[in-house]
Amino acid sequence: MRGIISLVCGIIFGFGLTVASMTNPEKVLGFLNIFGAWDPSLAFVMAGAILITSPMLYLQKHKVKPWFADNFSLPTFKEIDKNLILGATLFGIGWGLIGLCPGPAIASLALLNINSIIFLISMISAFFIVQVIRR
Amino acid sequence: MTIINFTPIEAFLGGLIIGFSVVLFYIANGRIAGISGIVNNSIFSNVNRFDNILFVIGLVIGPILYKIIINPEINFNISNSIPLLIAAGFLVGVGTKIGSGCTSGHGICGISRFSKRSIVATLIFMISAILTVFIKGLL
């Protein structure tokens, strides 16, 4: 059952990204271009999503069990450390250069665009490199 | 300030749909729908690997479904510069891995849970991305 839920959630997520045009890097760059001709759409995507997801905190506090798992798996690390700050900074630079973050980069595979595939290969190579260095 | 290409209704609706996916993944599977984490774990972790791979496959099916039932045309405008694409992909990969999250994990899930780490991360990557776009515009 968990597998079916995962597949369905992935489909809904990718569908929502497309409805919001967040698969389009131009749309994302338009949002980040706050000091120029600005497209506020991304803020509405975040607002819509958070409006729905904020009750999650309620579930978490009241320790309701998930339907198909023994417990909620949540990040346990709470500290704001160097890795978080450095990572978020680097991610922001990469995101601002092209307008793709991991979700839309994966979803855009559906469009078979060679440029987004180049981005994706580079992103996944980076995952491997960090993984190897960490070991 | 000039506002262009603003599509508030589609954006808000898409956001609600994404939020629904995040909530379902949480209440059913007990997990946070952070895409960079799911992709990483589908490659490097044996825990829930099958679920993670299925989520990633679903993420690609989503736009295909949109093409079939809503609109066969999906706008996709991306830079043609190969060095820029490689550099950006690399930075997004390194950044989300060492920063433990991206727009979905920190931006949507983390903020909803009032995670201090995620709120800080989201502020930083937003500012960093906005500055990047600003500086790129000057060049």
Image (cartoon, coloured by chain):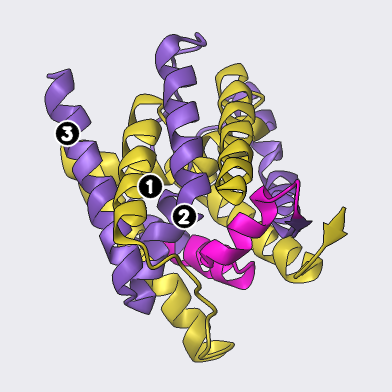
Chain colours: A purple, B yellow
At x 49% / y 28%, what residue is drawn?
A89
A83 to A97, vertically: above or below = above
Q: Residue A98 got which mark? A: 2
Q: Is residue B124 left or right of residue A77?
A: right
At x 57% / y 65%, what residue is drawn?
A26
Task: Kindly identify the amino acid type of the residue bearing the numbered disc 2.
Answer: Ile
Q: Nearer the viewer, residue B136 or B23?
A: B136
The x and y percentages for residue A93 are: 48, 38
Instruction: Identify the subunit bearing mark 2.
Output: A
At x 32% / y 56%, what residue is drawn?
A119
Separation (CA) of disc 1 from disc 3: 15 Å
Q: Is residue B8 left or right of residue A15?
A: right
| Quadrant of res B106 | top right
The x and y percentages for residue A42 are: 68, 54
A72 to A1, vertically: above or below = above
Instruction: Identify the subunit bearing mark 1.
Output: B
Dot 2: element: helix
Q: Which residues are magenta?
A: A10-36
The x and y percentages for residue B113 are: 63, 29
